Image (cartoon, rainbow, N blue to C red):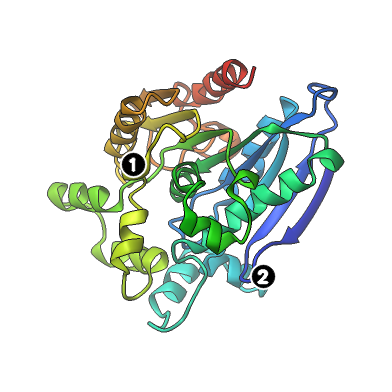
Amino acid sequence: MILQSFYIGDKHAEVTMMLSDNPIHQKEGRPAVVICPGGSYMYVSDREAEPVAYEFLAKGYHVFILRYSTIGSAMRRENRGTDRDELYQAASMVGDDEVLGSEFPGPLVELARTMTFIRENCHEFNVNPDKIGVVGFSAGGHLAASLGVHWNAEWLQEAVGEESRWYRPNFQVLSYPILDYMLNKEIAEARGIGDPKYMSTASRMVFGSEPDEDLVQKADVKEYVSPDTPPTFIWHTVKDQLVFIQNSLEFAKALESHRVPWELHTFQEGQHGLSLATNVTGIEEARAGEWVKLMFSWLDINLK
């Protein structure tokens, strides 16, 4: 395996490149994925990074882990502490005029540039340019889906500075994704759960101190699903009490209305942030852990 890390963009985004030496898919070029871990756009979860990457490497995929710009990735780059308590305290003290890089659409531009880098170097990396997808968890699922619905938007092309064909995803895998921030907030308030202070801080990470209505609208990704949205695999748990399953159900309805190939798996048990749902990633939930096998069988069909 070839392992290399580099920074991308003008803030704190880091890409870890893991090139497989598995002989599978070698002749026609390997499929590749960009993994976008979750973390409320406040940090980037390691549990949803390398452990997931090794699953794809074992199947012959090349993997690129995007640690997009957050206050956590900035602290990591500066070799400062990044445990959750420190991150929460640091995030709550961010000035209104400070730009962190996590504000939408900053990470989306970083993801698009990562996809562009892969396609520009597909011959060197032995990547099949027609088999490059995004895999996102929680907030990273929002990031992945944002590229899936906005990749051909003129405003994103202007922000990225490249033609949209370079960063078009061929497929997307969304794991317990937050896809509608307003819907998620409404459900939390109706059920009387969630920490209002945390939700306010998280909103600051995504939309800045003074949310721009146009950007808030663009971040509601289900409203931008179109026939150009790539084939989509989604999985979620009913008992997720942080990102509610309605996010995935509503997105699946939008995919179906536009005849986009999709598959949705819902599991009755399991909390938010399961990652692989095995002891490797710290939270074991056997039935939900089946999502990995289901995803690869779905990919086999859709990447023929």
Question: Could you tell me residue 83's position as x and y percent?
Answer: 53, 64
Residue occupied by mark 1: 222
**Would residue 1 be seen by someone viewing this image from the given angle?**
no
* Residue 55 pos. (x, y %): 66, 31
Q: Is residue 83 above or below residue 222?
A: below
**In the image, 192: left or right of 176?**
left
- Side of 199 relative to 38 (left or right): left
The quadrant of the picture occupied by the C terminus is top right
Residue drawn at x 44%, y 43% is 149
Q: Position of residue 104 (x, y in %)?
A: 44, 62
Secondary structure under the numbered disc 1 in the rendered image: helix
Is the residue 93 above or below the residue 105 in the image? below
Disc 1 from disc 2: Cα separation = 33 Å
**Of the pair 274 and 137, the residue shown nearer to us:** 137
Camera-side mark, 1 or 2: 1
| Residue that numbered label 2 is attached to | 77
Marked residue nearer the N-terminal end (1 or 2): 2
Residue 208: give its label.
none
Q: Dividing the picture into quarters, in which one does residue 265 lie?
A: top left
Circles 1, 2 touching at the beta carbon (< 8 Å): no
User: What amino acid does circle 2 point to?
Assistant: Arg
